[in-house]
Image (cartoon, rainbow, N blue to C red):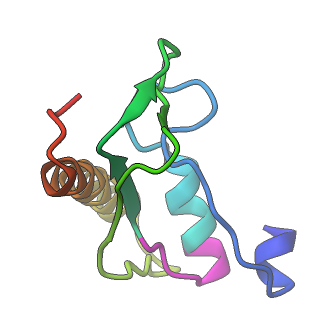
Amino acid sequence: LRAALSGRTLAITPDGPRGPREVLQKGVIDLARISGLPIIPVSYSARRARRFSSWDGFLLPRLATRIVVTWGEALYIPRDADDLLQTELQKQLETDMINLRKQADTLVGREYD
């Protein structure tokens, strides 16, 4: 939060350091609500890549492969958002992130992982 409020650009893994995979954690919503900064969902895929067997299935692109980056609309979380609205926006963002990944997978000709 200090970094965000001091004007630094943040990049956050939205499913947290322990997962589960593609389940958006509430901390992303809290940070956006408190800081007033937007959440810009971003995903990527690569035609040739190594998929790690870690909890998140991290995708490491191979050298000289085609990579596609997809992004969605900025999402602002109102400061006065109640728990119900925060939960709805969290689920919406989670769905948007999954759809962006699937879109990127399709664009590079990769099966949905």
Image x and y of residue 100, in percent: 24, 58
Judge by depth and name the residue closer to the eye, 59 or 30.
59
Q: Nearer the viewer, residue 51 or 24?
A: 51
> As displayed, is residue 87 above or below residue 60?
below
Stretch in magenta: 33-40
In which quadrant is the C terminus drawn?
A: top left
* Residue at (38, 82) in percent of width and height: 74
Residue 88 appears left or right of 6: left
Most distant residue in the front direction: 64
Residue 36 painted magenta = yes
Q: Is residue 33 above or below residue 13?
A: below
Q: Which image quarter: residue 24? A: top left
Where residue 68 sits in the image (x, y, percent)?
Answer: 33, 61
Answer whether residue 48 is magenta in the image.
no
How many marks can you see? 0
Viewer-proximal residue among 26 and 48: 48
Q: Residue at x 63, y 65 (%)?
A: 31
Classified by dominant secondary structure, the portion drawn in magenta counts as loop
Q: Residue at x 39, y 66 (%)?
A: 41
Which image quadrant is residue 82 in?
bottom left
Task: Left or right? Give the position of 87 relative to 8.
Answer: left
Please say if 32 is above or below 47.
below
Residue 84 x, y percent position in the rendering: 30, 57
- Asked which quadrant contains residue 22, the reply is top left
Residue at 80% across, 87% down: 7
Q: Quadrant of the N terminus?
A: bottom right
